[in-house]
Image (tube, rainbow, N blue to C red):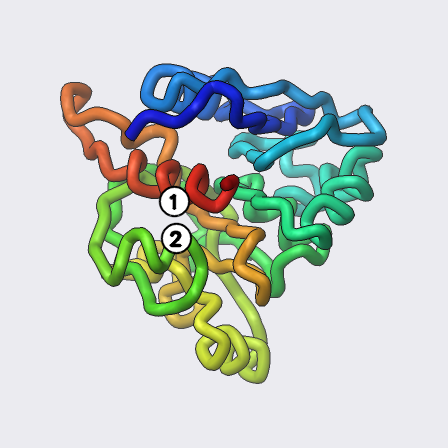
Amino acid sequence: MTKSSSVKIGLLQFPGSNCDVDCKNALREHFSIDVIPIWHTETTLPKLDGLIIPGGFSYGDYLRGGALASHSKIVADVKSFAARGGPIIGICNGFQILTEAGLLPGVLLRNAQRTFICKYTTLSTQSGKSFYQRTLNSSKINLPIAHGEGRYFLGREGLKKLHDNGQIVFTYDENPNGACDSIAGIVNEKGNVFGLMPHPERAMRTSTGGSSDGKLVWEAFLASCG
């Protein structure tokens, strides 16, 4: 898929972000898009068609993954962007930041086995109305995970609401971390804010011995950017 370079995609950066370069390279090499870097101390976002919150260890995961980053100056305008329907994708630590900031429900806890997990995993796309669910259309994809705090948790009533609203985008075929209902990725009620623990930016080509299924996720994100 080729996407116009006129599409403006922002990329948030925090102290400890380490997947920002991977995201930058994925969009440049495969979609001819140069992302706009945005440092966390900024107070306003530039005019954007979409926003990426990358993985890593913002603030060294002090307190909890994403806890301190969720209070950065830029987050207030990120919330405004989301409220206006702006497309946001948060990957791994980005997913943690989205939950800590209240842009997505739930929390990411330490893995059930209390160890860091780094491996490829198979995901099933669940039914729903978001661009991701419509684009991937119930398919299975293979993406890598790399996290120590990736166990999604939400109370019973909240989980029922996610299921009823079709907000669960991805579930693990073999739950690697003890996540509630094997959840790997969700959207907000509007469908414009998406958080997932697996890393699509690390699955862009098979020549490195992995999967190229990450392209499918980025294609869905870019489709949501108009």
| Residue 41: x %, y % from top left | 81, 25
Instruction: Return the residue nearer the eye: 223 or 188.
Output: 223
Give residue 204's quadrant in the image: top left
| Residue 212: x %, y % from top left | 22, 32
Q: Residue at x 33, y 66 (%)?
A: 126
Q: Residue at x 40, y 68 (%)?
A: 128
Q: Which residue type does callout 1 highlight?
A: Ala
Mark 2 lies on residue: 132
Q: Secondary structure at mark 1?
A: helix
On the rendered structure, is 113 left or right of 97? left
On the rendered structure, is 219 left or right of 23? left
Mark carried by residue 65: none
Q: Residue at x 58, y 77 (%)?
A: 158
Q: Residue at x 57, y 36 (%)?
A: 50
Q: Quadrant of the N terminus?
A: top left
The residues bearing labels 1 and 2 have C-alpha atoms spaced at a distance of 5 Å
